[in-house]
Image (cartoon, grey):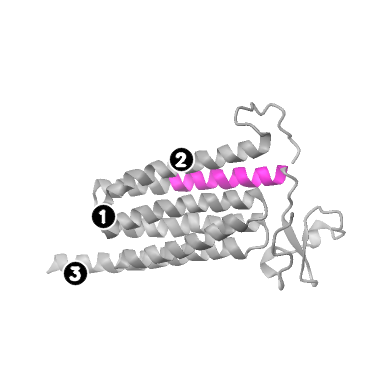
């Protein structure tokens, strides 16, 4: 029961976050929302596992949390340099 | 008898932690939708990534007891805390290098301008933080 309440809250939050990811005017808004969706998916997975009495789903959550940061950084690098293989030597120091 | 009392106390604490975590997670998502530009949205998103996820996982750890499941939950929370900070830092740096500037407000005008924009004639020391803005403008963000 307590997990059902938390699952409903996380689902509502995921709805709002997906809305921002679809609407977000810049690519950074979309990336921030995508990162939040990843976190929400991990929490949803853990809460659902607890609610159905099968906490083994947490191993999947561990994988997701490691993939989440890699995905965010990869997309950021792609939009900065236009290629994932770029070495980044000519990075601007002045921001 | 004592075991029943302890179980009741743990269940009550779990209820409080899970409901509070869900509340803060939802508040962070609302901020992600309502805030006016990308930097303030990062601020709101970090709330749900740290306080929301932390409280939710603490509630689940209490329900799991001292088992391997609790250890996995704590590892997930630790990795989330580290990677959230790294991802937000990288996002903010990339946004700044993409010539985006945070919105600031002019005192007494209730108007948001882009920091270091061409029409920003007010010196930076006269600007007040975003917390006291009265009316929002340009809800779509600072760049088209």
Q: Position of residue A85 (x, y in %)?
A: 60, 27
Q: Position of residue B122 (x, y in %)?
A: 85, 60
Q: Quadrant of the C terminus of chain A?
A: top right
Left or right relative to A2: residue B130 = right
Label 2 to label 1: alpha-carbon separation: 25 Å
The residue positioned 47% from the left and 50% from the top of the image is A38
The residue positioned 26% from the left and 58% from the top of the image is A52
Mark 1 element type: helix
Residue position marked by numbered label 2 in the rendering: A67
Which region shows up in magenta?
B79-97
Q: Nearer the viewer, residue A18 or A49?
A: A18
Same chain check for tags 2 and 1:
no
Residue position marked by numbered label 3 in the rendering: B5
Badge number at residue B28: none
Question: Contact (CB < 8 A) between labels 3 and 2?
Answer: no
Position of B81 relative to A82 (above/below)? below
Question: Contact (CB < 8 A) between labels 1 and 3?
Answer: no
Q: Position of residue B93 (x, y in %)?
A: 66, 43
Q: Position of residue A46 (x, y in %)?
A: 34, 53
Residue furthest toward the left? B1
Mark 2 element type: helix
Task: Provide the chain ID for the residue under circle 1.
Answer: B
Left or right relative to B39: residue A66 = left
Q: Nearer the viewer, residue B29 or B48?
A: B29
Residue position marked by numbered label 1 in the rendering: B64
Question: Contact (CB < 8 A) between labels 2 and 1?
Answer: no
Give neighbour class at mark 1: few <14, some 14-19, many 20+ (Cα, 10 Å). Answer: some
């Amino acid at each position: 029961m307590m997990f059902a309440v938390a699952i409903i809250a996380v689902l509502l939050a995921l709805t709002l976050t997906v809305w921002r990811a679809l609407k977000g005017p810049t690519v950074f808004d979309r990336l921030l929302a995508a990162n939040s969706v990843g976190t929400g998916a991990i929490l949803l997975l853990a809460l659902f596992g607890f609610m159905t009495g099968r906490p083994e789903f947490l191993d999947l959550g561990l994988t997701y949390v490691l993939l989440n940061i890699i995905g965010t950084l990869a997309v950021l690098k792609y939009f900065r340099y236009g290629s994932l293989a770029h070495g980044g030597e000519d990075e601007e120091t002045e921001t | 008898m004592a075991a029943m009392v302890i179980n009741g106390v743990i269940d009550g604490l779990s209820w409080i932690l899970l409901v509070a975590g869900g509340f803060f997670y939802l508040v962070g998502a609302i901020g992600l939708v309502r805030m006016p530009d990308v930097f303030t949205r990062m601020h709101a998103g970090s709330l749900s990534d740290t306080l929301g996820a932390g409280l939710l996982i603490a509630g689940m750890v209490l329900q799991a007891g001292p088992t391997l499941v609790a250890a996995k939950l704590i590892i997930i929370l630790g990795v989330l805390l580290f990677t959230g900070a790294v991802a937000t830092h990288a996002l903010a740096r990339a946004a700044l290098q993409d010539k985006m500037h945070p919105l600031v407000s002019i005192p007494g005008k209730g108007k948001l301008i882009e920091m270091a924009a061409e029409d920003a004639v007010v010196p930076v020391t006269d600007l007040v933080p975003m917390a006291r803005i009265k009316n929002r403008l340009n809800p779509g963000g600072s760049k088209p």
